[in-house]
Amino acid sequence: MFSALVYSEVSEIFKALSDPTRLKILYSLYQGERGVGEIVAAVGLTQSAVSHQLKQLRDKRLVKVRREGKYAYYNLDDDHVRELLKIGFDHAVHE
């Protein structure tokens, strides 16, 4: 058995993954590192809306940010996130 904290953290990860907008953002990052403008274009939302969702994903350690001057580039936090997405999408499209 795990501690209550671990169960809570896993629950929060799945809550973050339960939002279709956040999944679109994560899928765009599944393809590789992206700037905010590229993510905005990929998901069709405003920059403000994307930034809000990215903060939630950062808070859950699902994405990480790399800053270069005034620009921010996002990527999936690690291979665990990549695997969660792969399993989820494979399961959803499996016939």
Image (cartoon, helix red, strand yellow):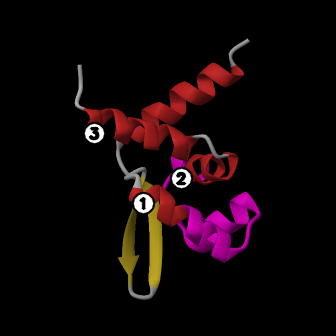
Q: Amino acid at mark 1?
A: Arg
- Give the amino acid at mark 3: Leu
Q: Residues within 10 Å of mark 2 (few under 14, many from 20)?
A: many
Using the numbered discs, state the Cα–Cα distance from disc 1 to disc 3 in whole angstroms: 18 Å
Quick check: 19 above or below 73? above
Amino acid type at image mark 2: Leu
Magenta stretch: residue 48 in it? yes
Q: Which mark is residue 66?
A: none
Question: Mark 3 and mark 1 in contact (Cβ < 8 Å)?
Answer: no
Callout 3 secondary element? helix
Which quadrant is home to the N terminus? top left
Quadrant where the C terminus is found in the figure = top right
- Tell me if 32 is positioned left or right of 89 in this view: left
| Magenta highlight: main SS | helix
At numbered mark 1, what does the secondary structure look like: helix, strand or loop?
helix
Q: Are marks 2 and 3 in contact (CB under 8 Å)?
A: no
Q: Is residue 33 visible?
A: no
Asked if the residue at tag 1 contacts the one at tag 2, i.e. Cβ–Cβ closer than 8 Å, the answer is no
Residue segment shown in magenta: 28-53
Q: Sequence-wise, which precedes: disc 1 or disc 3? A: 3
Question: Can you name the residue that lies furthest to the right here?
Answer: 44
Q: Residue at x 74, y 66 (%)?
A: 45
Q: Which residue occupies 62% across, 46% down?
A: 23
Q: Nearer the viewer, mark 2 or mark 1?
A: 1
Q: Which residue is mark 3?
A: 5
The residues tagged by marks 2 and 1 sit, at their Cα atoms, a distance apart of 13 Å
| Secondary structure under the numbered disc 2 in the rendered image | helix
Residue occupying the point 41% across, 52% down? 60
Query: Where does label 1 land, which residue?
Result: 58
Task: Identify the residue under disc 2.
Answer: 29
Instruction: Judge whether residue 67 can be spotted in this image.
Output: yes
